C-alpha cells in the first residue's frame, strides 16, 4: 500500500482541518513539515506538488491532492466519514455553515495576508492583531447565529462531527491566539468543549503536532 503523506504546517488552519479529517478516518500518515515562516512553501520541491505554494498537500491512494476542503471531500467520499447529511438541502446548509468560516473568514486571516498588512504598516506594531480582531469576531458571531438552525448534541449539527466542526475548530485556535473575543458565542463554546474531548480533534491540535 502506498504511504500517505501530509505536507503541512502546524499552525495552518487548512492543514489543521485535514489532520482532523485524517484522524476521523483512521488514516495513518507521515507528516512533512512545510515551514511557512521560513518560506518552505515557495521552494521548487513544494511548488512542484502544489503550484499555488500552499499547504496542505496530501499524497494518498496514488493521488496528490490540494485545497483542504477538496481533500476533506475526498476523505469523506472514500472513507465514509458522514461529514454531511445525505439529504442535499441539509448538506448544503451544513456546507454553508462550514464555509462561513473556511471560505469567508479564514482567507483574509491567513499568514500571507496578515504578513502583507504588517509590511504595509511598519509603524503599527499591532497591525496583525488588530486585523485579526477586526475580522474574526464578526465571522464567529455570524457562525453562532447560523448554529441556532441546528441542534448541538453536542457537535455543530448533531451527535457526530461534521464538516462544520472541522472548519470551526482551527478558526477558534486562531481566535484564541490573537485574543479575538467570542465569549458571547455560547453555542460555539459548547461545541468547542465537545470537540476538544474528541481524540481525533485533540491529536490534530497545533500544540499536539508542533515541531520540537
Image: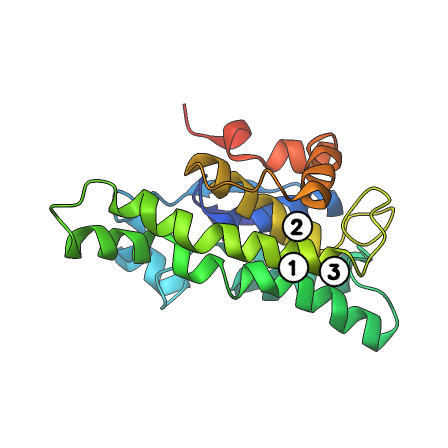
Mark 3 Cα within 10 Å, few/some/many (few <14, many 20+)? Answer: some
Contact, mark 2 vs mark 1 (Cβ under 8 Å):
yes
The image shows residue 150, relative to residue 182, as above or below, that is below
Give how far across and how far down residue 69 sits, in percent. Answer: 59, 63
- Which is nearer the eye, 82 or 90? 90
Q: Quadrant of residue 53?
A: bottom left
If the image is split into quadrants, where does the C terminus sit?
top left
Residue bearing mark 3: 76
- Viewer-closest of 64 and 12: 12
Find disc 2 in the rendering and name its residue. 166
Task: Look at the picture and state if 11 lies above or below 83.
Answer: above
Which residue is nearer to you in this view: 164 or 23? 164
Kindly indicate whether the residue at mark 3 contacts the one at mark 1 (C-beta within 8 angstroms).
Answer: yes
How far apart marks 2 and 3 lie (CA) works out to 12 Å
Instruction: Give me the residue at 82% from left, 47% from top.
Output: 152
> Which structural element holds mark 3?
helix
Residue 82 in the image: x percent, y percent? 82, 57
Could you tell me which residue is drawn at 56 percent across and 42 percent down? 182
The crowd level at tag 2 (other Cα within 10 Å; few <14, some 14-19, many 20+) is many
Q: Residue furthest top?
A: 212
In the image, farthest residue toward the bottom: 88
Residue assigned mark 1: 72
Point out residue 2 in the picture as x, y percentages from the top left corner. 62, 52
Residue 78 rendering spot, x and y as whole percentages: 76, 62
Q: Earlier in the sequence, mark 2 or mark 1?
A: 1
Q: Which is in the foreground here, disc 2 or disc 3?
A: 2
- Local secondary structure at mark 1: helix
Camera-side residue of 212 and 11 = 11
| Residue at the (51%, 28%) spot, across then down | 207
Amino acid at each position: 500500500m502506498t504511504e500517505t503523506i501530509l505536507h503541512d504546517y502546524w499552525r495552518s488552519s487548512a492543514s489543521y482541518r485535514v489532520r482532523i479529517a485524517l484522524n476521523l478516518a483512521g488514516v495513518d500518515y507521515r507528516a512533512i513539515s512545510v515551514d511557512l515562516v521560513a518560506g518552505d512553501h515557495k521552494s521548487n520541491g513544494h511548488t512542484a506538488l502544489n503550484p499555488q505554494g500552499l499547504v496542505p498537500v496530501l499524497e494518498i491512494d496514488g493521488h496528490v491532492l490540494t485545497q483542504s476542503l477538496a481533500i476533506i471531500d475526498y476523505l469523506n467520499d472514500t472513507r465514509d466519514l458522514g461529514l454531511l447529511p445525505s439529504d442535499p438541502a441539509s448538506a448544503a446548509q451544513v456546507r454553508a455553515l462550514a464555509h462561513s468560516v473556511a471560505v469567508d473568514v479564514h482567507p483574509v486571516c491567513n499568514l500571507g495576508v496578515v504578513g502583507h498588512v504588517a509590511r504595509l504598516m511598519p509603524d503599527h506594531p499591532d497591525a496583525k492583531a488588530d486585523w485579526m480582531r477586526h475580522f474574526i469576531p464578526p465571522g464567529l458571531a455570524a457562525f453562532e447565529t447560523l448554529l441556532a438552525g441546528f441542534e448541538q448534541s453536542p457537535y455543530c449539527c448533531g451527535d457526530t462531527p461534521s464538516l462544520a466542526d472541522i472548519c470551526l475548530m482551527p478558526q477558534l485556535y486562531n481566535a484564541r491566539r490573537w485574543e479575538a473575543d467570542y465569549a458571547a458565542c455560547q453555542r460555539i463554546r459548547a461545541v468547542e468543549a465537545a470537540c476538544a474531548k474528541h481524540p481525533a480533534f485533540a491529536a490534530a491540535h497545533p500544540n499536539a503536532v508542533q515541531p520540537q
